[in-house]
């Protein structure tokens, strides 16, 4: 396949299990000493059987080891049970998000007949979305109740199932780790009336990660507003004292999920977006798990990723990368063939919806006696408004953090180690592949001035989610004193993929670390950095 095509980003890659030395252009600061981790799909077929959706590809983990101005790279397929069985049988042994399993050719005639009507009850453990440091191990996650403990050499060590531990059927791929080391995870369960949960995991201690994950407890439970169509959530908010859970207007039809075992429909067809439905936000006390009686709502707002949340003068401020007025097909039903053809990027439907970073402000004071036309937001310089429309129900009129026309920014990252759950000013994001203002670029956004700065390479260079790395103190002082790391896939056949290092203050380029010509950097989804 020609490298200079959209398909290059969504084709299988070979793993690079042994570390290779990169070629440095520019100068990587000496104070950077640690590892950038990435996770995402990397293999899209087994034998003659192919996945249909980007989210289905087998997880490939990446690690850039940075020390003394030099960088090494390695990648390894996550040896999950699903990956091992697919490799052994050279077929798709379990259902994925957008692909059904292929029948077992070794099954009896009756078993093959039965599989036409009743699909396997086995679940995928292909954790291909995110990876983060947890104690001495790495934790690979996705939006399922299963996650993997992984060694720093990218070897799968142990599968952890929150379904077995806590009867949870979905779990967020984006845990929050608090300053005291406690980890929070959101999830949902569908036995009986659906429920949404916030899970609390004790702080990691050296060598006991598996034991601590098994000690996870449900901190709080929220009854789903719908008995048959619970909402889908990819990430939640956290402040110093609260967690924020959103029932989004993207729902999962449990009827379609259950009947898919007979109809053969894929799981992603059970997802649907209703632009007239409210996004409803629940506030939970971290100390007790109590759910505050007041709910906040915004019509039609959906998001995958929170940017940051914090408390300010008896308000909660929550920033998200919001999507409004889109279609379900654009976000959940896009096939790999459509991505490879490039049609998705030029689809005019993307111009019909507003995808910009958005601020929500939730006033915490009692509003029961306030008149319905009174704005409850009293923060100075805030354009967000809130109105009490019923007892314990507040409508939110959001504030856009970028001007109209600056669409298409997602994958947000902040100075997490110093400003997560605290007031902040800057975040960094990656532009979507669609034709819009931020297409295939890295951006820095000032949420106070609403100004943005972009780094963009050539039209063939596609950066991943940016990861901010703060300069160690006392040398580093300001919030944006550090660097931004991003992997870049270059589809020009004469160029190599590379790790990009940018000055976090102005996004000027500091250095690149090119992998060898025989090595490819997979087009990944999420990742993180940890210091050595």
Image (tube, grey):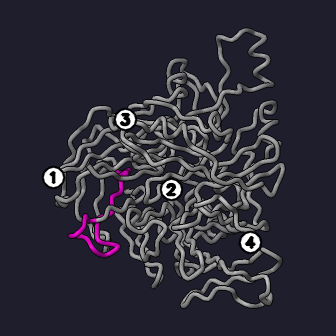
Q: Earlier in the sequence, mark 1 or mark 2?
A: 1
Q: Position of residue 272 (x, y in %)?
A: 74, 54
Q: Position of residue 108 (x, y in %)?
A: 72, 9
Distance of label 4 from label 1 (alpha carbons): 52 Å
Tell me if residue 490 is in the magenta stretch.
Answer: yes
Distance of label 3 from label 2 (alpha carbons): 20 Å
Question: In the rendered structure, which segment of residues is drawn in magenta?
Answer: 471-492
Give the number of the disc on residue 151: 3
Looking at the image, is 199 positioned above or below residue 312?
A: above
Distance of label 1 from label 2 (alpha carbons): 30 Å
Mark 4 or mark 3: which is in front?
A: 4
Instruction: Write the residue at 70% across / 61% down.
Output: 248
- The residue that disc 1 covers is 68
Picture quadrant of residue 394: bottom right
Verify CB contact (< 8 Å) between mark 2 and mark 4.
no
User: In the orientation shown, which residue stands out farthest toward the top?
Assistant: 108
Picture quadrant of residue 346: bottom right
Instruction: Write the residue at 58% across / 27% down.
Output: 49
Q: Earlier in the sequence, mark 2 or mark 4?
A: 2
Q: Earlier in the sequence, mark 1 or mark 3?
A: 1
Distance of label 1 from label 3 (alpha carbons): 23 Å
- The residue that disc 2 covers is 176
Q: Earlier in the sequence, mark 4 or mark 3?
A: 3
**Element type at mark 4:** loop
- The residue that disc 4 covers is 294
Whether residue 12 is visible: no
Instruction: Write the residue at 51% across / 18% down.
Output: 88
């Amino acid at each position: 396949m020609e490298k200079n095509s959209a398909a290059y980003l969504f084709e299988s890659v070979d793993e690079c299990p042994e570390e290779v030395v990169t070629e440095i252009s520019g100068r990587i600061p000496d104070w950077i000493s640690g590892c950038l981790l990435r996770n995402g799909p990397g293999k899209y077929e087994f034998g003659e059987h192919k996945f249909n959706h980007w989210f289905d590809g087998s997880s490939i983990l990446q690690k850039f080891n940075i020390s003394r101005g030099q960088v090494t790279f390695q990648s390894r397929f996550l040896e999950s049970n699903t990956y091992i069985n697919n490799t052994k049988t050279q077929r798709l042994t379990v259902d994925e998000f957008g692909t059904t399993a292929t029948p077992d050719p070794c099954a009896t005639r009756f078993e093959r007949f039965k599989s036409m009507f009743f699909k396997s009850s086995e679940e995928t453990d292909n954790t291909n979305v995110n990876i983060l440091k947890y104690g001495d191990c790495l934790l690979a996650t996705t939006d399922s109740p299963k996650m993997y403990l992984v060694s720093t050499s990218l070897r799968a060590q142990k599968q952890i199932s929150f379904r077995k531990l806590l009867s949870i059927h979905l779990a967020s791929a984006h845990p929050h780790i608090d300053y005291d080391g406690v980890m929070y995870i959101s999830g949902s369960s569908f036995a009986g009336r659906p429920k949404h949960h916030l899970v609390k995991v004790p702080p990691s201690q050296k060598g006991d990660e598996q034991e601590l994950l098994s000690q996870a407890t449900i901190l709080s439970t929220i009854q789903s507003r719908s008995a048959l169509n619970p909402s889908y959530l990819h990430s939640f908010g956290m402040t110093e004292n609260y967690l924020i859970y959103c029932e989004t207007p993207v729902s999962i039809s449990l009827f379609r999920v259950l009947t898919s075992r007979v109809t053969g429909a894929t799981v992603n067809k059970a997802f649907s977006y209703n632009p007239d439905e409210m996004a409803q936000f629940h506030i939970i006390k971290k100390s007790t798990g109590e759910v505050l009686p007041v709910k906040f709502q915004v019509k039609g707002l959906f998001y995958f990723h929170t940017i940051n949340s914090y408390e300010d003068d008896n308000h909660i401020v929550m920033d998200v990368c919001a999507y409004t007025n889109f279609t379900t097909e654009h976000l959940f039903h896009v096939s790999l063939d459509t991505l490879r053809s490039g049609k998705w990027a030029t689809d005019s439907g993307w111009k019909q919806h507003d995808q910009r970073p958005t601020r929500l402000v939730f006033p915490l004071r009692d509003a029961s006696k306030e008149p319905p036309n009174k704005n409850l937001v009293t923060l100075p310089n805030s354009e967000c408004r809130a109105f009490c429309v019923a007892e314990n129900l507040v409508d939110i009129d959001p504030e856009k953090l970028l001007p109209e026309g600056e669409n298409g920014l997602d994958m947000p990252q902040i100075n997490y180690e110093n400003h997560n759950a605290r007031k902040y000013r800057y975040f960094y994001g990656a532009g979507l592949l669609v034709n819009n203002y931020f297409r295939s670029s890295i951006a820095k956004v000032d949420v106070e001035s609403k100004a943005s700065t972009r780094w963009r390479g050539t039209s063939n260079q596609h950066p991943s989610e940016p990861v901010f790395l703060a300069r160690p103190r006392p040398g580093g002082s300001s919030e944006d004193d550090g660097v931004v790391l991003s992997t870049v896939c270059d589809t020009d056949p004469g160029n190599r993929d590379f790790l990009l290092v940018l000055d976090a203050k102005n996004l000027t380029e500091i250095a690149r670390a090119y992998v060898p010509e025989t090595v490819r950097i997979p087009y990944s989804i999420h990742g993180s950095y940890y210091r050595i």
